[in-house]
Image (spheres, rainbow, N blue to C red):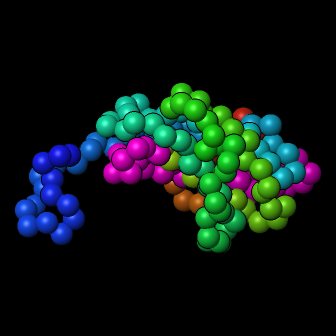
Amino acid sequence: PSDCPPLGGPKACNAPVPVPADAPTNATAEDLAEDWLYLRWLAGPTPGDCVFVAWRVEWRRLPRDPWSNAIAACAALGSRTEVTCIVTELPPSGPIELRIREMCTDPQANSAWLYTPTVLLIGPGEWQGYCHGVAPQGAYCGTNPGDVY
């Protein structure tokens, strides 16, 4: 805002903190293949003060590898209501965890992450979903393609 001094200025800025978008919900893995899956989710119920920029979808192999770079096909989605993409180049071994987040022009308005339960490739084109402990809020832990994760 114009009433805020530059960083390091003598006055404190009392600009309001933006309200973040609600986290996405109801992630679904469909049409699973050997090294990719089709991911669908719902935008959070309210956008808060978020001016939508992109969806960020990342994956990692467990136990606790670093998160991958953002999935380009998911980042290219042009609106808050476009909520499907293909996650490619998944490794053929080890359980995989995915996370989804709404990105905004003001990073303080970004949504929280939706973490999916773990998926595991159990054979060519066969994935299994399972939970470690309790399923994340807004997620369901199932074992069939098309189950909500």
The answer to whether 40 appears left or right of 14 in the picture is right
Residue appearing at x 70%, y 59% in the figure: 96
Q: Identify the residue at image location x=27%, y=44%.
A: 18
Q: How many marks?
A: 0
Determine which quarter of the picture holds residue 118: bottom right
Q: Residue at x 36, y 47 (%)?
A: 106
Q: Residue at the location (55% across, 43% down)?
A: 55
The image quarter containing residue 142 is: top right
The residue furthest top is: 81
Within the magenta stretch, is there residue 43? no
Name above or below for residue 146 compared with residue 117: above
Q: Is residue 45 visible?
A: yes
- Kindly tell me whether residue 143 is visible in this rendering: no
The question of residue 124 being in magenta is answered with yes
Measured as percent of width and height from the top left, residue 45 is found at 41, 31
Q: As drawn, which residue projects farthest toward the left? A: 11
Closer-to-camera residue (27/17): 17
Q: Position of residue 109 (x, y in %)?
A: 35, 46
Residue sitting nearer the eye, 114 or 7: 7
Quadrant of the drawing holding the C terminus: top right
- Vertical side of 31 occupied by 65: above or below: below
Q: Nearer the viewer, residue 57 or 128?
A: 57
Residue 34 in percent (x, y) is at 87, 51
Residue 83 position by quadrant = top right
- Magenta range is 103-130
